[in-house]
Image (cartoon, helix red, strand yellow):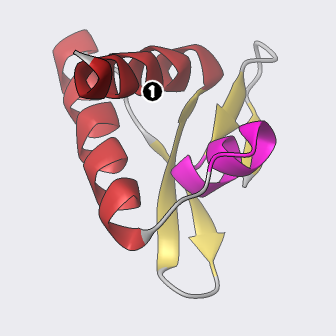
Amino acid sequence: MQTSDNNNVQWYSILGFCNLYGIKLNTQLSSRLGKLASKEFKVRNIERQTVPDERLDKVYTYPHALLEYVFVQYFSSLAA
């Protein structure tokens, strides 16, 4: 899922971001990445957006740049 705000910042759900980059996603990985993204939002004092979801009722979306940061941090920690 992708949306844009008034500043043309692209916001993505975890699944939408993974689909954009061809990253295979399972429930466990989605949960971990969502928790990391939410933690970064709290640290940066940014308000999350939500979009409707057929399976989960609603999902959170995050700015593209923040998701890039979270994914790099997560996958770098696996390689270390």
**Residue 79 position within the rendered picture, expressed as x and y whole percent measured from the top left:** 31, 21
Type of amino acid under label 1? Phe
| Residue in view at x 58 percent, y 14 percent | 65
Q: Would you identify the image quadrant in which residue 44 lies? A: top left
Q: Nearer the viewer, residue 14 or 62?
A: 14
Q: Residues within 10 Å of mark 1 (few under 14, many from 20)?
A: some
Question: Does residue 55 belong to the magenta stretch?
Answer: no
| Residue in view at x 74 percent, y 45 percent | 22
Q: Would you identify the image quadrant in which residue 6 lies? A: top right
Left or right of 44 in this view: 52 = right
**Residue 16 position within the rendered picture, expressed as x and y whole percent measured from the top left:** 69, 51
Q: Nearer the viewer, residue 76 or 35?
A: 76
**Residue 25 position within the rendered picture, expressed as x and y whole percent measured from the top left:** 53, 60
Q: Which residues are magenta?
A: 13-23
Question: Does residue 16 belong to the magenta stretch?
Answer: yes
Left or right of 62 in this view: 28 = left
| Residue 80 in the image: above or below residue 18 | above
| Residue in view at x 51 percent, y 26 percent | 67
Residue at image mark 1: 71
